[in-house]
Image (cartoon, rainbow, N blue to C red):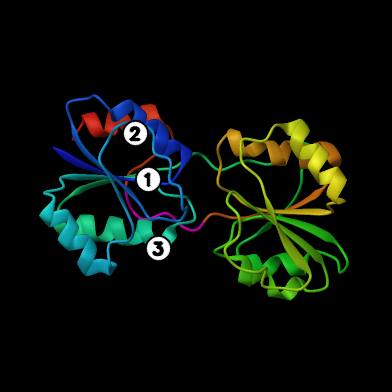
Amino acid sequence: MTLLLLAGTGLAQEIARRLDGRNIDVIVSLAGGTRTPDVAGGLPCRVGGFGGDAGFRAFLASQAITAVLDATHPFAARISARSARICAEAGIAYCLAQRPPWQARPGDRWHLIDREEEAAHHIAPGSTVFLATGRPTLDRFANLRSCHLICRQIEPPDREFPFENGRFLVGTPPFSVAQEQDLFAALGVDWLVVKNAGGRASATKLTAARELGLRVAMINRPALPDAPVVHDAEAALDWVAGQ
C-alpha cells in the first residue's frame, strides 16, 4: 500500500513516528501553515497545498495512493471534507484521525460558540481577551474593537496586528499550567478564546483559566465528514494495518 498522511498536528507527528521504519510506503503532507514545519521521523514529506480538487486528484493518481489518513487540525474542515469526498469518488480508503474534543469540567466557565464573531455576544467592552486561535481567523474578531486583544502565536508575526486595540505575543509551546496562570495574571486577562482542538498538551491553558476563574469562549468543532474516525495513534495504526 501507499499511504498519504495529511499532517499538521501533534497526533500526526505521533503517527508519523510510529509509522517510520515499518514496511509501508508513506508520504507525509503539510499544508505549510508554519514556516518551520516539524514532522517527526524520517518519512518523505511534501509541503504546500495540492491546488484544489483537480490537483488533489492528480496527486493521488500520480503517487498511486491507496489510503489516506487525515490527521489535520479539527478546524481544517474544508480540507477534510474535500479529502473524504475525493477519496470516496476514487475508491481510496480514507480515515479521519482527531483527538477527542475537550469537555467542560466542574469550575469551568465556558460559553460555547460556533463562530469567532459570536465571542462579542458574550464579552463585555473593556475586557482583556487572550486569543489562542492563531493568525488565520484573527480578522473575524473585528467586532471586539472595544476590548484589548492579545493573540499568541508560535512564530514572530509577518504583519501588523489588524486592529489598533491588539498585539501579538510570541510563545513556544509546551506551556505548563503554572506558566499559563502566571501569564494570564500578568496580562490581566478576563477572557480566553480558544478552538476546541482537544489534546492533553494544549489543555493547560484551560486548566489555568479554570483555576483563575476566567471565562472561556469555546469555539465548537465543525461537522465531521461521513467517514471512519479514530481518536488516537493506536487506533490510527490499527486502521492502517487493516488496509
- Circles 1 and 3 in contact, beta carbons < 8 Å: no
Start and end of the magenta stretch? 222-227
Residue at position x 32%, y 61% in the image? 49
Q: Marks 2 and 1, how far apart in space? A: 9 Å
**Is 77 rendered above or below residue 25?**
below
Pointer 1 local density, CA inside 10 Å: few below 14, some 14–19, many at least 20: many
Q: Marks 2 and 3, how far apart in space? A: 23 Å
**Is 51 rendered above or below residue 205?**
below
Q: Which residue is mark 2?
A: 16
Q: Earlier in the sequence, mark 2 or mark 3?
A: 2
> Could you say whether the residue bearing mark 1 is in a helix, strand or loop?
loop
- Circles 2 and 1 in contact, beta carbons < 8 Å: yes
| Disc on res. 78 | 3
Residue at position x 58%, y 61% in the image? 135
- Give the image location of residue 187, x and y in percent: 84, 50
- Give the image location of residue 136, x and y in percent: 54, 64
The residue closer to the viewer here, 136 or 105, is: 136
| Disc on res. 235 | none
